[in-house]
C-alpha cells in the first residue's frame, strides 16, 4: 500500500507580510499543494494522509470547494485528513457540514475515531482539534493500545462495537465487496493520523505510539521534518516554510506498507528556503566595506533562498554598521548584529585617566578567566561609555 504523508500546508497564510515577495510566497504554497495532488496521481498513491493545518485559519467555503475539486481528480487515492490547531473545528466551521468527494474522509471527532478503507486494507485512526489549544493526552499509550486491541477483535473488516467511534470509508466496502476485490485474509494495516507534540497541543511521547502497535504514525504540527521513530513515527514538517524562522528542508513523505514492514522517504520541495548567512566583520572594515561584503555573500544564494544576515566578529568602536542598507537588499528578511566593538583599552585608559572607567578597565584586565574578562571589558566599557554619552547630551 503506497502512501503520501503531508502536514501543515497552511493554505491562506501570507508569509513575511509587507515584504516584496510576500504575495508570491502565498501563491507558491497553493501551487505546492496542487503539486502534491499531481504527485499522488503520478505515483499512483493508494492513500494521502493530511495531518492537520491544511489551512492557516478557518477555511472559506469556496476554498473547500476548490480543494474538493482537486481531490476528485484522484479518485483512486483515498484521502484522510484531520483539523489541526490553526484550522480547528470552530462551531461555525465549514468543515462541519461540507460534503467531500467519495474518496475523501474527514475525521472530525474530538476523540480518537477510525475510518476503515477496505479496498486498501487499511484503518486510519485520528481526531481533530475543536479549539486552538488542547492539552489532553489523546495519544497516550493506554488509549492507543485499547483501540488497537478492540480493532483486532473485528473479523472480516466488518463494523463492531468500539470504545471509540468507527466509520466506514465512504462507499469503500460497498464498491468492492461484491466484486470480490476485498481479500479478507489479508492483514489490515493500522495507521495513526495525528497533530500535536508540544505541551499545549496534544502532547505525546513517540515511544508510546511506537509501542502501541501501529504500522505507521503520521504526525503534523511541528514544522521541522523528523523521523521520531524511524519508519514508525514521522513528523511531516510543513510542506513549505510558512514563517521566516522555518529553517531546514520542507516537503513531503512517501512510503509503502507491506506485510514485511514500512519504508518511508522524504522528498523536498524548494519553492522557498530560509537560510542564515554569517558575515565575519573585522575592525579594519569600513561601513561601506561591510555592505559590499554582504552584497557579495548574497550573490552565492540560489534563486529560491531568502536570507537572515548575521553579522559577527569585531567592528571598529566608532563605526556604525549599515544595518538599514543591508535590510533593503534583495531577499533579505532579517539582519542581526552580533558584532562587538573593538575597543583600544590602552587608549581609553589614557583618555579617561583618573576616572571610574580607567579604574574599571585596570581591574577587569586582572581577571584570570579569559572569557569572563573579555565579556566584562566589552559590556562594562560599552555601558559606561553610553552613560557618559547620555550625560553629555543632557548637559548640551
Image (cartoon, rainbow, N blue to C red):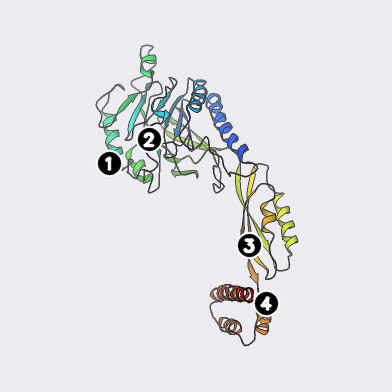
Q: Is the residue under label 4 in contact with that under label 1 (CB below 8 Å)?
A: no
**Near-viewer residue (68 or 43):** 68
Please report contact status of discs 2 and 3: CB closer than 8 Å, yes or no: no
Q: Quadrant of residue 140?
A: top left
Image coordinates for residue 22, horizontal then vertical, percent: 61, 41
Side of 61 relative to 297 (left or right): left
CA gap between label 3 and label 1 equals: 50 Å
Which secondary structure, mark 3?
Answer: strand
Q: Secondary structure at mark 4?
A: loop
Compute the Cα span from label 1 to label 2: 19 Å
| Residue pointed to by mark 3 | 312
Please tell me which residue is depicted at 65% across the width and 43% down the height of the picture.
20
Residue position for label 1: 142
Task: Bin the neighbour count of mark 1 within 10 Å (Cα to Cα): few under 14, some 14-19, many 20 and up.
Answer: few
Label 4 to label 2: alpha-carbon separation: 61 Å
Q: Which of marks 2 and 1 precedes in the sequence? A: 2
Residue ID at (65%, 79%):
345
Q: Is residue 187 visible?
A: no
Q: Is residue 38 left or right of residue 193?
A: right
In the rendered image of this protein, does residue 250 appear above or below residue 190?
below
Q: Quadrant of the C terminus?
A: bottom right
- Please say whether residue 128 is visible from this viewpoint: yes
| Residue wearing tag 4 | 344
Amino acid at each position: 500500500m503506497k502512501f503520501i504523508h503531508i502536514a501543515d500546508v497552511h493554505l491562506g497564510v501570507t508569509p513575511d507580510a509587507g515584504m516584496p515577495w510576500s504575495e508570491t510566497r502565498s501563491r507558491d504554497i497553493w501551487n505546492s499543494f496542487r503539486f502534491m495532488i499531481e504527485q499522488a496521481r503520478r505515483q499512483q498513491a493508494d492513500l494521502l494522509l493530511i495531518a492537520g493545518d491544511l489551512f492557516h485559519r478557518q477555511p472559506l467555503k469556496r476554498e473547500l470547494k476548490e480543494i474538493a475539486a482537486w481531490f476528485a481528480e484522484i479518485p483512486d487515492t483515498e484521502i484522510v485528513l484531520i483539523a489541526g490547531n490553526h484550522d480547528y473545528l470552530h462551531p461555525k466551521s465549514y468543515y462541519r457540514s461540507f460534503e467531500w468527494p467519495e474518496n475523501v474522509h474527514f475525521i472530525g471527532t474530538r476523540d480518537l475515531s477510525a475510518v476503515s478503507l477496505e479496498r486498501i486494507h487499511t484503518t486510519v485512526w485520528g481526531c481533530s482539534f475543536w479549539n486552538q489549544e488542547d492539552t489532553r493526552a489523546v495519544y497516550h499509550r493506554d488509549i492507543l493500545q485499547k483501540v488497537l486491541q478492540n480493532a483486532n477483535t473485528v473479523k472480516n473488516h466488518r463494523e463492531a462495537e468500539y470504545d471509540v467511534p468507527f466509520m466506514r470509508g465512504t462507499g469503500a466496502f460497498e464498491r468492492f465487496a461484491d466484486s470480490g476485490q476485498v481479500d479478507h485474509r489479508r492483514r489490515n494495516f493500522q495507521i495513526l493520523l495525528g497533530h500535536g507534540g508540544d505541551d499545549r497541543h496534544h502532547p505525546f511521547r513517540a515511544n508510546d505510539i511506537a509501542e502501541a502497535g501501529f504500522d505507521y504514525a503520521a504526525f503534523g504540527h511541528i514544522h521541522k521534518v523528523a523521523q521520531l521513530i524511524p519508519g514508525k513515527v514521522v513528523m511531516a514538517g510543513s510542506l513549505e516554510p510558512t514563517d521566516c524562522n522555518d529553517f531546514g528542508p520542507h516537503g513531503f513523505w512517501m512510503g509503502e506498507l507491506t506485510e514485511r514492514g514500512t519504508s518511508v522517504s522524504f522528498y523536498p520541495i524548494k519553492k522557498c528556503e530560509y537560510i542564515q548567512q554569517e558575515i565575519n566583520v573585522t575592525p579594519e572594515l569600513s561601513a561601506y566595506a561591510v555592505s559590499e561584503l554582504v552584497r557579495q555573500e548574497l550573490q552565492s544564494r540560489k534563486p529560491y533562498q531568502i536570507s537572515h544576515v548575521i553579522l559577527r566578529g569585531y567592528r571598529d568602536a566608532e563605526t556604525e554598521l549599515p544595518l538599514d542598507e543591508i535590510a533593503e537588499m534583495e531577499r533579505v528578511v532579517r539582519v542581526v548584529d552580533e558584532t562587538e566593538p573593538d575597543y583600544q583599552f590602552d587608549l581609553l585608559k589614557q583618555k579617561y585617566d583618573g576616572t571610574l572607567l580607567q579604574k574599571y578597565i585596570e581591574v577587569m584586565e586582572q581577571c584570570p578567566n579569559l572569557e569572563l574578562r573579555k565579556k566584562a571589558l566589552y559590556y562594562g566599557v560599552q555601558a559606561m561609555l553610553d552613560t557618559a554619552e547620555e550625560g553629555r547630551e543632557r548637559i548640551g
